[in-house]
Amino acid sequence: MFSLTGAEISHFLLAMGCLLAMAHLLGFIAERMFIPRVIGEVAAGLVLGPTLLGHFFPDAFKWLFLGFPTEDKLFGLLYQFGLLMLMFCSGLKFQTRFNKEDAKITSALVIGATIPAFIVGWVAADFFNITPYLGSANNALAMKIIIAISIAVTSIPVISKIFNDLGIMHTRFAKIVIACAGIHDVLLWVALGFATAIASQKGVFTVGTALTSVGISLGFIFCTLLLGYLLFKRLTIVKQNLLFRSSNLGYFLFIMFMLASLAGSLKVETIFGALLAGIIAKVALPNPVSERLEQSVSNISFSWFIPIYFATVGLQLDLVRHFNPWFFLTYLLFATLTQTAAVYFTSRIMKQDRFTSFNLGLAINDRGGPGIVLSSVAYTTGIINQEFFAILVMLALVTSWIPGTWLRIVVTKGWRLMPGDENIVPQRRNDDKIKTITKSTTS
């Protein structure tokens, strides 16, 4: 009970170690090429998965990742942990302090970037022949919702990473984009919960089903944020909280797991619980505590769980046999133009200049982590098949690449991101300081 043989443990550690090392190596190379690290981490799964290793050396791939009956389940468990940690970290990036003007712009962008893009995606699903891409649930309505979300979704983790890498996290531009992405994604996760709910009911859809699913999701969000805020505020930093005193990180991980478990019990996606746990911690705790928590969570998450998660996404892709490049290019252009145009025109309505509006449009078009989460959840629940799963993952990767490259050009050239960010001085990360120290000690 609760045990593996020594040979199975040894084999799993070998496979996991190879995947983790490849994820960090290709992630490092991607960053040196000014590409978001997540692209390199997914590429690790492509290299060691069916796309390359499995295509040219199928026996080696099967031996490494399917070497004993439960090995795939162990990777599945790590995959789920990585997904939860990614959403928890995303919640910790949530922005809460705004002046009146920034709040007004953020609210307008949330509405303007969500509703038009979602509607266009929904309508476009009727023009695409989606039948060949339906998953085992065989639910066209659920897939239409997934398509609409894929057009409108934005990434907190990747765009935050881009801002950190460029040293512009302190700018007005970064604060507005991250806040917009956070609120944006919470709304879209409600739609995702609805899609998975109707998919699980094998095509049975009624108004009651819709109201129940959306009501449970919204009720869970509202109650969790309200009660969580009050409890975190009153019970976290007190002498009687022995769990917090014994381990700050352990306490918050416990809260995250409990909320994720509760979400799953209510048939709301478990990622909701992890995301809300991060948001509550960010909003309710004093800044020094939330920043220390974010640093602690980031250390363990971005060194192990999250790279394994993204690499495992790559392991599930077979771009040789299950990928249509022409359909992908069409879908990429459609999704990018729709989302960017929605943000651009909303920004112009808010009286922002053309260059600012273009910057906002490209930044909010970044689908990154949430785009991959969307594809993962839709695939595992049978809404989409492997071909469309590959399309959505590649869409998330390419739309992460575009803003990363463009914003680097803007910062390097010294151009203004938006009014209020004139003559900004990039603030480099601690990693850069460590690299500088390392170079000085080795020279």
Image (cartoon, rainbow, N blue to C red):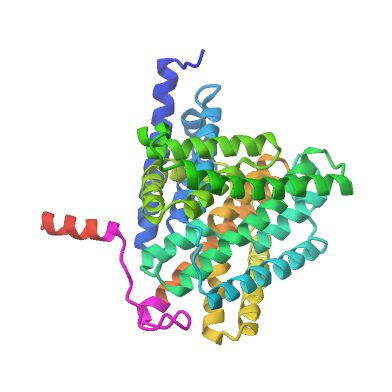
Instruction: Work out whether 8 lies above or below 23.
Output: above
Q: Provide residue 283's location: percent of width, then percent of height.
A: 50, 55
Q: Is residue 163 left or right of residue 214?
A: left
Quadrant holding the C terminus: bottom left
Q: Provide residue 146's location: percent of width, then percent of height.
A: 72, 54
Dividing the picture into quadrants, the one containing residue 430 is: bottom left
Q: Provide residue 347's location: percent of width, then percent of height.
A: 61, 80
Residue 413 part of the magenta segment: yes
What count of labels does the image hold?
Answer: 0
Instruction: Work out whether 53 lies above or below 323.
Output: above
Q: Is residue 368 left or right of residue 338?
A: left
Tell me which residue sits at (36%, 42%) in the image.
21
Tell me which residue sits at (55%, 87%) in the image.
353
Q: Provide residue 68's location: percent of width, then percent of height.
A: 51, 22
Residue lying at the far top in this picture: please name it. 1
Q: Main secondary structure of the magenta part?
A: loop
Give whichever of 199, 15 is nearer the camera: 199
Tell me which residue sits at (63%, 65%) in the image.
332
Residue 60 part of the magenta segment: no
Q: Can residue 404 be seen from the camera position used here? A: yes
Q: Is residue 137 left or right of residue 429?
A: right
Give whichever of 155, 217 is nearer the camera: 217
Give the residues drawn in magenta, as a range: 410-432
Q: Can residue 384 be seen from the camera position used here? A: no
Instruction: Work out whether 70 lies above or below 146.
Output: above
Instruction: Work out whether 69 lies above or below 190.
Output: above
